[in-house]
Amino acid sequence: MALVDHDSWDIEYEGCERLRHQLLVYLNQRQQLNPRTSQFVQLTSSIQTGIEQLAKDMKHLKVVLDNAITWETSPEEELQQRRIDWDRLTSQLREIREKFANSSRSNVPAASGSAWQDQDLGPGHSNSSRNTALDVEALKQKKTEMLAQQNEGLEVLSATLSRQRQLATQLGNEVEDQNNILDNLANAMDRVETGVQRETQSIGQVNRRDSTWGYWLVIIALFVAIIVVVFV
């Protein structure tokens, strides 16, 4: 029975690639928006949460890669390609973080200036009230999105743990089968050794019997020779 020859790398890697692509789309959309809008705030929250989730997924992906290298569940060429893919993902995550940080810094003065302009507008505090309502709504949506993403992350983690448990179970069954094969082989070797010893003893007895017959023949020949010498 062959060892377990598959793992969860492909699934984990595809998930990281989809999340990375989604973050790039969010960043491009965010650059086209006014920092004062609620959609800008929502995208900012989604990008922050997505970056954190991608970092966690990549840590788990590294664990899957290390396990594959330790147990040698894939050819060396494939493992080398996986190392290259993981390094590339790491570099891309760093670029996404830098791009997000730079765009956030560039939007700070504009947001601050617009806030002062809103305070100077009349009449009264109508603009301030509208901005406050937008902020509250944005916070609610942000919290809802965070909860949804956390639930999704928990589901992914649960599925990953389930796959790892299945792999561990299959590996344990394989080890048990291999132990049974080794036990049967040891028993067969014991039987063969016993048979060899028995046959060796039989051969020894035959050799001793053959030697005794030779002695008897010599004795009989000498006896006949003595009789011939005495009576002839």
Image (tube, rainbow, N blue to C red):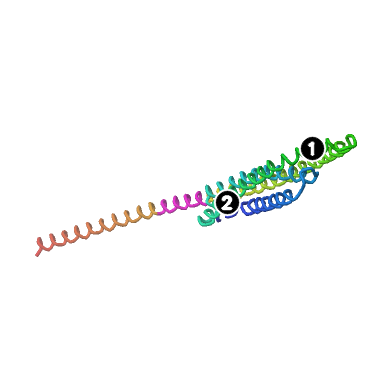
Q: Mark 1 points at which residue?
A: 115
Front-most of 139 and 178?
139
Give the x, y percent position of residue 107: 71, 42
**Residue type marked 2:** Arg
**Residue type marked 1:** Ala
Would you say 144 lies left or right of 11 here? right
Would you say 7 lies left or right of 195 here? right
Q: Main secondary structure of the magenta part?
A: helix
Front-most of 110 and 60?
110
Question: At 57% from the left edge and 55% from the top edge, which residue is drawn?
Answer: 5
Please check the rendered image and state whether residue 187 is part of the magenta-colored stretch, yes or no: yes
Tag in front: 1 or 2: 1
Q: Name the residue under label 2.
A: 88
Front-most of 35 and 119?
119
User: How packed is label 2: few (under 14 Cα within 10 Å), some, or many (20 or more)?
Assistant: few
**Screen quadrant of the N terminus:** bottom right
The magenta span reads: 181-195
Question: At 41% from the left edge and 54% from the top edge, which residue is drawn?
Answer: 195
Asked if the residues shown at circle 1 and circle 2 are in contact, with their CB atoms under 8 angstroms apart, the answer is no
Front-most of 206 and 63?
63
Give the x, y percent position of residue 76: 50, 55
Circle 1 sits in a helix, a strand or a loop, which is it?
helix
Circle 2 sits in a helix, a strand or a loop, which is it?
helix
User: How packed is label 1: few (under 14 Cα within 10 Å), some, or many (20 or more)?
Assistant: some
Give the x, y percent position of residue 35: 76, 44
Give the x, y percent position of residue 87: 56, 49
**Screen quadrant of the C terminus:** bottom left
Please check the rendered image and state whether residue 130 is part of the magenta-colored stretch, yes or no: no
